[in-house]
Image (spheres, rainbow, N blue to C red):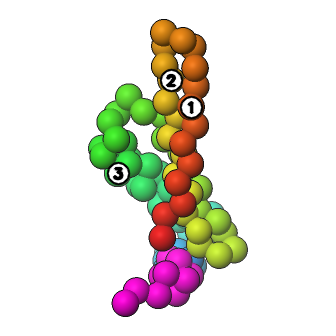
Amino acid sequence: MLNKRADKLELLRIAEAVALEKSIDKELIISSMETGIAKAAKSKFGQENEIKVSINRDNGDIELFRKLIEKDNLMILLIRKTLF
């Protein structure tokens, strides 16, 4: 069985380890992770979707935001999903 809390914290530990090993800002590593997850989500949900990913820097929670726009009624729907 997966330990979701440990997995999320491991993601942050990996970012920190890579940052230290490569002498790169940790924020740049996490931002790159967010970009990668967003690209994967776009390939799943479609390139026309506006998708934003946020990784919580304290606990590793990953949130995915997908904006859907219904053009006929000018309605915008923001879908939020927490991963893990």
Residue 53, position as x, y percentages in the image: 53, 52
Identify which residue, 71 or 34, lies in the foreground: 71
Label 2 vs label 3, nearer the camera: 2
Q: Which residues are the magenta region?
A: 1-11
Quarter that holds the N terminus? bottom left
Residue count near mark 1 (Cα–Cα under 10 Å), binned few <14, some 14–19, many ≥20: few
Residue count near mark 3 (Cα–Cα under 10 Å), binned few <14, some 14–19, many ≥20: few
Residue lying at 53% horizontally and 77% vertically, measured from the top left: 8
- Identify the secondary structure beneath mark 2: strand
Residue 21 seen anywhere in this rendered image of the structure: no
Q: Name the disc covering residue 69, or none.
A: 2
Residue lying at 52% horizontally and 87% vertically, measured from the top left: 6
Label 1 to label 3: alpha-carbon separation: 21 Å
The residue type indicated by label 2 comes to Ile
The residue indicated by pointer 1 is: 77
Residue 67, position as x, y percentages in the image: 52, 34
Tag 1 near tag 3, CB within 8 Å: no
